[in-house]
């Protein structure tokens, strides 16, 4: 029987060692899990959720820019958690990272351990996933969700009663739209059986190996909100969804609505700021500007009449009058000169200046 009560004394491992390559230049200096998302570091949303489901002790598996995590979250007490950090000297892959982090677990071999990818927003019921895992005596229970394009994820076919029959990581020929949603319940003994100190992929080695060996690998499938924020488009989408309350997060600093204004943000009464936009601390949106579904970082400026849609504007960056940005990432301190029109997927590196773009009509010359 499934329960939605918090699981007692559950320990967790959070995978946060990836380089966040697809989110450059945002991740050049800040790891993906620490990017400000709906007003707080991304992980704050995952930590709040884990806490709500009974997690009290969590091991961060870090590698890239490891020290920044401890600076941001300390010992975890501000979040009602005990946070422990385990750092790989060089990245060990997802399986190697889980094995390395397990050295810091305190639970016995027969206890379930929650393992989370550090770039996921999810509305699923962790307690129900743990309850399914316990009731069926599984080795591992994977949260599964459905997406339109499974080729970018781990494709996970199951039998009707939820037994995982294969794990096909990023296959060009998916057999189902059901994918690995990046939240696992592992028996601790299964983690301990991953070879220590080696580069191991849980997706390409551990899961296929367990299935091959006849171990019970289960899928917990549901249709709740789910998003991997690993691309710029998904990152702005996730932030906007949190601000608008499409996914509830107790870490949201304010109430859900059209926009979230952080301390000292200045929005002209003649500006339009909508679609779950965050206006960072001390950032300015001038008269006649229109900003929709975007993340404006601290101290940036969107000048009069500029249009910013589904984009990220880095801290201290400036979007000059009349510039138009759609699905663009502007790095910290960059300057987008007046009149520029930048479109989907464009990334402007930190500190770059795009000169003013003036269009002259023949009658003017
Ligand atoms: N500590 C550590 N060490 N963490 C790592 C390492 C490593 O070597 N490599 C990756 N990670 C962390 C990342 O920081 C991220 O939180 C998580 O592991 C998954 O890595 P991603 O790079 O985001 O993988 P993905 O999105 O391409 O694919 C994964 O997630 C999908 C769901 O979003 C896979 O698990 C797929 O099967 C899954 O469908
Ligand atoms: Mg990912």
Image (tube, rainbow, N blue to C red):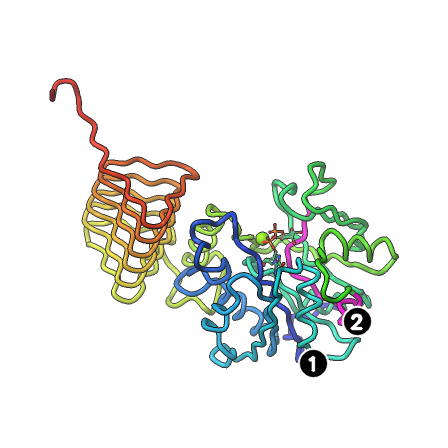
Residue 61 sits in quarter: bottom right
* Farthest residue, direction top: 362
What segment carries the magenta color? 178-193
Q: At which x and y percent is residue 94?
A: 67, 59
Q: At which x and y percent is residue 361?
A: 17, 22
For the residue carrying disc 1, how many other residues have a C-alpha within 10 Å: few (<14), some (14-19), or many (20+)? Answer: few
Residue at x 66%, y 75% (from the top left corner) = 11
Q: Nearer the viewer, residue 337 or 312?
A: 337
Task: Tell whether position 192 is magenta.
Answer: yes
For the residue carrying disc 2, how many other residues have a C-alpha within 10 Å: few (<14), some (14-19), or many (20+)? Answer: some
Q: Give the structural element (helix, strand or loop) at label 2.
A: helix
Task: Tell whether position 326 is magenta.
Answer: no
| Ligand 1 - quadrant of the structure image | bottom right
Q: Is residue 53 left or right of residue 276?
A: right
Residue 107 sits in quarter: bottom right
Q: Quadrant of the N terminus?
A: bottom right
The disc placed on residue 201 is none
- The residue at which mark 2 appears reads as 189
Q: Nearer the viewer, residue 226 or 328?
A: 328
Q: Nearer the viewer, residue 135 or 202?
A: 202
Residue at x 47%, y 68% (from the top left corner) = 68
The disc placed on residue 106 is 1
The answer to whether 156 is drawn above or below residue 199 in the figure is above
Residue at x 61%, y 41% (from the top left corner) = 148
Q: Is residue 341 left or right of residue 9?
A: left
Q: Is residue 288 left or right of residue 275?
A: left
The answer to whether 12 is drawn above or below residue 213 in the figure is below
Residue at x 66%, y 65% (from the top left corner) = 115
């Amino acid at each position: 029987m499934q329960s939605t009560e918090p699981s007692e004394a559950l320990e967790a491992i959070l995978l946060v060692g990836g380089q966040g390559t697809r989110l450059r230049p945002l991740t050049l200096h800040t790891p993906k899990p620490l990017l400000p998302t709906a007003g707080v570091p991304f992980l704050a949303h995952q930590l709040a959720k884990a806490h709500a489901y009974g997690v009290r002790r969590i091991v961060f598996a870090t590698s890239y820019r490891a020290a920044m995590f401890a600076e941001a979250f300390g010992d975890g007490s501000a979040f009602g958690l005990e946070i422990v950090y385990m750092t790989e000297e060089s990245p060990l892959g997802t399986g190697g990272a889980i094995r390395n982090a397990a050295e810091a677990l305190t639970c016995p071999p027969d206890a379930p351990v929650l393992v989370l990818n550090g770039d996921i927003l999810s509305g699923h019921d962790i307690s129900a996933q743990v309850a399914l895992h316990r009731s069926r005596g599984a080795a591992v229970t994977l949260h599964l969700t459905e997406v339109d394009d499974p080729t970018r994820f781990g494709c996970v076919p199951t039998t009707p009663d939820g037994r995982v029959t294969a794990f096909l990581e990023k296959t060009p020929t998916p057999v189902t739209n059901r994918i690995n949603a990046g939240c696992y319940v592992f028996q601790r003994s299964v983690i301990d059986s991953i070879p220590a100190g080696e580069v191991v992929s849980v997706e390409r080695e551990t899961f296929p190996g367990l299935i091959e060996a006849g171990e019970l690998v289960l899928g917990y499938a549901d249709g709740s909100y789910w998003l991997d924020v690993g691309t710029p488009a998904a990152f702005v989408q996730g932030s906007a969804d949190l601000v608008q309350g499409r996914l509830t997060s107790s870490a949201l600093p304010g109430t859900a609505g059209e926009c979230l204004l952080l301390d000292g943000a200045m929005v002209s009464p003649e500006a339009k700021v909508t679609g779950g936009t965050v206006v960072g601390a001390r950032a300015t949106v001038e008269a006649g500007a229109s900003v929709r579904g975007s993340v404006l970082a601290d101290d940036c400026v969107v000048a009069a009449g500029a249009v910013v849609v589904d984009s990220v504007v880095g801290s201290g960056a400036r979007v000059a009058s009349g510039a138009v940005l759609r699905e663009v990432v502007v790095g910290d301190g960059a300057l987008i000169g007046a009149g520029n029109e930048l479109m989907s997927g464009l990334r402007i590196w930190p500190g770059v200046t795009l000169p003013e773009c003036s269009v002259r009509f023949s009658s003017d010359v």
